[in-house]
Image (cartoon, rainbow, N blue to C red):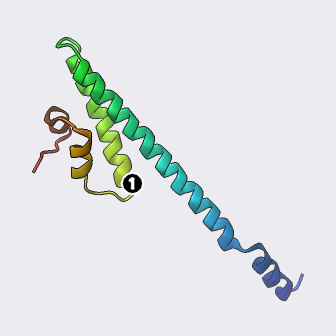
Amino acid sequence: MSLRDSIELIQAVKPEAGFKAIETEIMAERASSMGAADAKVKATLAALAAATEADRPVALAASRNAVWAYFVQRELCGFRRHADVIRDLGIPDAVLLGLGVMRR
């Protein structure tokens, strides 16, 4: 195979199309994992709100873990500010203080 044949083969394969397909798949996976993390936060916050006084420490720990994981996932996707999410999801101060986050 000559150099010219190799170049023609590379042009025919179009590696940029393969990169675009992988990039699209990565974006879809990010969106899916963000949705799953969001759902887990909502579920743990609902459980915290419904928890009895005896169950509150466990529910609080679960909420803190879920919120922390969600914040990490958001930051990995490039979202650095969480104020809107904190407000929209109604994340209580008790959860945030356990993460070392304070409201401004």
Q: Is residue 67 above or below residue 22?
A: above
- How many labels sit on residues? 1
Say whether residue 22 is left or right of residue 79.
right
The location of residue 100, given as percent across then percent down, is 16, 42
Say whether residue 89 is left or right of residue 96.
right
The location of residue 83, given as percent across then percent down, is 21, 51
Q: Is residue 89 above or below residue 49?
A: below
Seen at 27% across and 47% down, the residue is: 85
Give the quarter of the image for residue 25: bottom right
Q: Is residue 33 above or below residue 80?
A: above
Seen at 35% across and 29% down, the residue is: 43
The location of residue 41, given as percent across then percent down, is 33, 35
Quarter containing the N terminus: bottom right
Dot 1, crowdedness within 10 Å: few (<14), some or many (≥20)? few
Asked if one can make out residue 62 in the rendered structure from this viewpoint, the answer is no
Residue nearest the viewer, comparing 86 with 11: 86
Give the quarter of the image for residue 20: bottom right
Residue nearest the viewer, comparing 74 with 92: 92
Mark 1 is on which residue type? Answer: Leu
Q: Is residue 85 above or below residue 9?
A: above
Say whether residue 97 is left or right of residue 38.
left
SS for callout 1 = helix
Seen at 23% across and 44% down, the residue is: 86
Asked if one can make out residue 53 in the rendered structure from this viewpoint, the answer is yes
Q: Which residue is mark 1?
A: 76
Residue nearest the viewer, comparing 83 with 76: 83
Say whether residue 59 is left or right of residue 18.
left
Seen at 82% across and 78% down, the residue is: 9
The location of residue 64, given as percent across then percent down, is 26, 33
